[in-house]
Amino acid sequence: MLWQAVTAVRDLGRLHDIASILIRYGFGDMVRRMGLANLLERTGRALHWNEAQELAQLEPPARVRRAMEELGPTFVKLGQMLATRIDLFEPEWITEFGKLQDSTPAAPWADVHQQLCEDLGAPPEAVFTAFDFEPLAAASIAQVYRARLEDGSAVVVKVRRPGIRPVIEADLRWLARLAELIEKENPDLRSFHPQEVVRQFTQSLRRELDFAGECRNAERIAENFSGYTDQDEPAGDVTAEVRPEPHPALPIIVIPRVYWQWTGERVCVQEFIDGISGRKLAEVDQAGLDRKVLARRGAHAVLKMIVEDGFFHADPHPGNVFYLPGNRIAFIDFGMVGRLTEERRDQLMRLLLGLVKQEPRRVADVMLDWTGDSARDEDSLVLEIQTFVEQYHGVALKQLRLGAMLADLVAILRQHQLALPPDLSLLIKAFISLEGMGRELDPDFDMASEAMPLLEQALRARHSPKALLQRGWRGVGEALSLAAGLPQDVSRLLRAARRGRLEIHIEVAHLQRVGNQIDSAANRLVLGIVIAALIIGSSIVMTVPGGPTLLGLPFFGLLGFTSAAFGSLWLLLSIWRSGGKE
């Protein structure tokens, strides 16, 4: 059955491109099962089914990755998001998804110039004293230009690609249909919630298209780091020799300033960060920066965002990090951020402390809370987690690799067909990326030692008398609010009971399934009785002389036998299709 969204004429061109690419990479069966082939061929758009010979020989992860690259920005972003789902995919898939690069040739300057004139209210040459028409960087959704304001400030102008939104919306409608098809036809994959994954991805991508939202994220993180100094960082194992004195006027963590007068949904203007890219470590050494300090400060900054603020940069890869004089660090590109509730942060702290202190029961409890679903064999799952944690008993803190340990824990969940909520998969991926960046800067970087003081400090803060008192008052307030509304609720309940309108709804999944099976069996039984009655009645009619005939036989008797035959055939097909399950 075709869904209404894809029948829109505006999607046909994009759907033809998608179908052609999928066929080329050996996914023609998917095109047929989704109804794309019939739809496109009825509209006169030919599909070339013989293009899949060479590319179809690639391994499935490589085929999917290369298809995503050709499908464009939506699918590149989807692949990058799936690279965070180590709870859903095996390592070879995660590796392929990680190869997806968000870069593409720049859009024509004429199109960009026209859009900039609309968004800025004037030509860029009139708004800025200098504007470099050659893009500094070009990605699938946006491209970035350098410019200078009248006061001499250097800025970057980030522009959304002209015409990109309709393409992305068409892709998102197709992905929603694909997720629906997967859940319908592959019961084993329902536990991974493909429709929920696509829903979360859709929300994330639409937020990323809104540059004003990205700038609001940047300002929120900048506010969280306001007044943040080196003294705020736990000491860890860092010695006094590598702890430089902080400059009183310069922040350790830098977030680019936003110029709101020229910022909107399709364009944003931010301070230009003149630093060393996280990808150019050789220049870090040439500039005389201390790698150990940079690794420690970067780790503390991200841990602060995760544990203390609950609002963190979800994509801290080297391209989004710059190193500045004085061993300072700048973060850019806040299109993808993660949010953690207070409860999630508490669970994370308990999990990490359980890993570091080798407390398997604590780790198992948190992991089961995270999955939300009941494991098919919970005892086996808990035993595996306990065995995994206990193998690190007696291992020195410096030898622990928290990122690898988290990845291995999630692999255990994957083996039991349990999936993490999207916010946690994003967190774990960010945590793994953070530890990897730290080790690139400093091979001796010890994430466990750096995290322990901050985790213990945050846990103590959560259980301090002041924090307990605040939570207690909050609980008292909620209890009083509930008590205040109780008389009204009881009155409403009694009024409904007096009028005979009181209803109690109890829904038990197993009983509902049994009821459906009984209904189906009853329907088949009734049909069987009707068929039997038709056969008996037709037999009687066949013995009665007179009346119309067909082929020398009584017409009504023949009609009854024919109806009984069709009814019997339908009944047998129904039983066969159910596979004996009902």
Image (tube, rainbow, N blue to C red):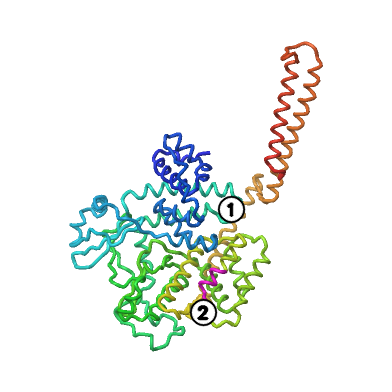
Q: Give the range drawn in magenta.
A: 401-408
What type is the residue that disc 1 sits on? Answer: Arg
Discs 1/2, front: 1
- Residue 472 seen in render: no
Q: Label 1, on which residue?
A: 190
Q: Is mark 1 on a helix, strand or loop?
A: helix
Residue at which label 2 appears: 456
Residue 46, image x and y in percent?
A: 43, 37
- Foreground pick, 9 / 102: 102
Q: Please say whether residue 124 is one of the residues in the magenta stretch.
A: no
Percent coordinates x, y for residue 571 in the rendering? 71, 34
Task: Residue 532 in the image: state x and y as whole percent.
Answer: 78, 28
In this image, 194 relative to 517: left or right? left
Quarter of the image with the C terminus is top right
| Residue found 76% across the figure and 25% down from its top | 534
- Residue 291 is situated, as x and y percent measured from the top left of the image, at 38, 79
In front of the other: 457 or 278: 278
Horizontal side, residue 25 vs residue 255: left or right: right
- Does residue 20 appear anywhere in the picture? yes
